Image: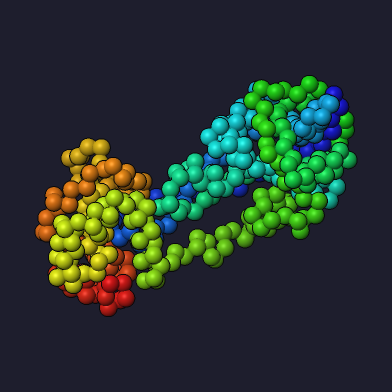
Amino acid sequence: MQIAVMGAKKRKSAKNAKAGGSDAAREELLQDAGGFDWGWPALEVVMASTELTRRLIAGGFSGCGYGIIPPDGPPFLSLFGDNLPGMKSALALMKEWTSMSGPNAIRIEIAYDGPGYVLAISQQIDLLRWRLSGIDTVRQPLIMATSHIKRMDSRHPNLDLLADYAQQPVAPLWLVVDELPRSVARAGGSRSYAFTPQWDNAILLPGIDIYRQLDDRPVDTMAKTEAEFESRTKEGAGADWPPEPERDPVSVAAARERRLAASVPKTLHVLRNTNRGAALLAHGHALGCAKWQVEQAICNLRSADFLAYQPSSVGKRLAMIEAVRNRVLEPASMDVDLASITVDQLTTQIALDAAHLLRRLEPDREMAEATGDRIRRLQELGYG
């Protein structure tokens, strides 16, 4: 079988960033003492690993080729390296992504650049987010994606055939790996090279993005030219990164309503449609609370019901409750016993929740002790 093999420069790169943490989060958790406002935005970042790049480097990834399966099968794209076990390991990792999220999990882009081109292998961002942080409507973390970029110094004419094919409405292709002797890779340039494809863990992709003009690339492309990559590296993160969360009263209220409805719908339904719920809402009204403050407080009290066990450490218990609030999805069949919530518990929780929000709105202001004073201060700030 004849295929076109495009030689590559010996250069690898990956976009990545690290997210860090500190003991400040634990201290803040203890200070809040279980108080929580579901509408206050939290800056959360999840990042893809660089494992694919590590495996491709171990495989000696040096070029790629394009072939056709006779007589009328879909084409295939083969990634070549001088260490076949290493290349197979890289393909196995990508196979895992598709097993979890489907064939769209892998995004392959080719951008023509001068006499050569740029190849970028990355993960589809939405599917990556679901794998890293779960499929829900509560958390909306920022995603730090990674991409393995290979810059090829030449372009075989057969690549144009693949570009034409990729423009069709339905254009699947196989992704495979194979071994290319180091002596061939070092010769550079493009040539025809006969070989038998390795079909172990072959991945049938729904398509590939090929841009003949750099201006054809979408805004979110990972196929960056060398000049673009170096320029961005020198500039570093922009002044608008990370983006500032929306903390105005309207945005906080909307986020709170969305998150509570997505996480604890059964509690809200029982609270809004039973006599016991009406009694608790009336108690909150007597304190000067808005309806949402009572609903949020009861949902926060209910969070402890989802703990797998009751830890002896206060810090551990608060951390577990925080984790519950980030992942809980209350089933409709779950029993919601509002009779177990006393008015004293409700009053205390309202005070803690108000303090949680005030502490973030006015970090330098001394916190009022009385629940009513905290509620009135929130109203003065427009968040009541």
Q: Is residue 222 visible?
A: yes
Q: Is residue 78 above or below residue 120?
A: above
- Image vertical order of residue 144 relative to residue 280, above or below: above
Image quadrant holding the C terminus, namely: bottom left
Q: Residue at image x 16%, y 58%?
A: 275
Q: What is the x, y in percent for residue 61? A: 71, 33
Task: Residue lying at the far bottom in this picture: please name it.
Answer: 380
- What colouring does the structure picture have? rainbow
Quadrant of the rendered image containing residue 77: top right
Residue appearing at x 22%, y 47% in the figure: 336
**Image coordinates for residue 155, horizontal then vertical, percent:** 84, 42
Which of the 4 quarters of the picture holds residue 87?
Answer: top right
Above or below residue 117? Residue 195 is: above
Q: Which residue occupies the foreground of this view, 253 or 357?
A: 253
Q: Position of residue 300 (x, y in %)?
A: 25, 54
Tell me which residue sits at (56%, 59%) in the image. 237
Question: Which corner quadrant holds the N terminus?
Answer: top right
Name the residue: 18% across, 72% down: 288
Residue 20 seen by the camera: no
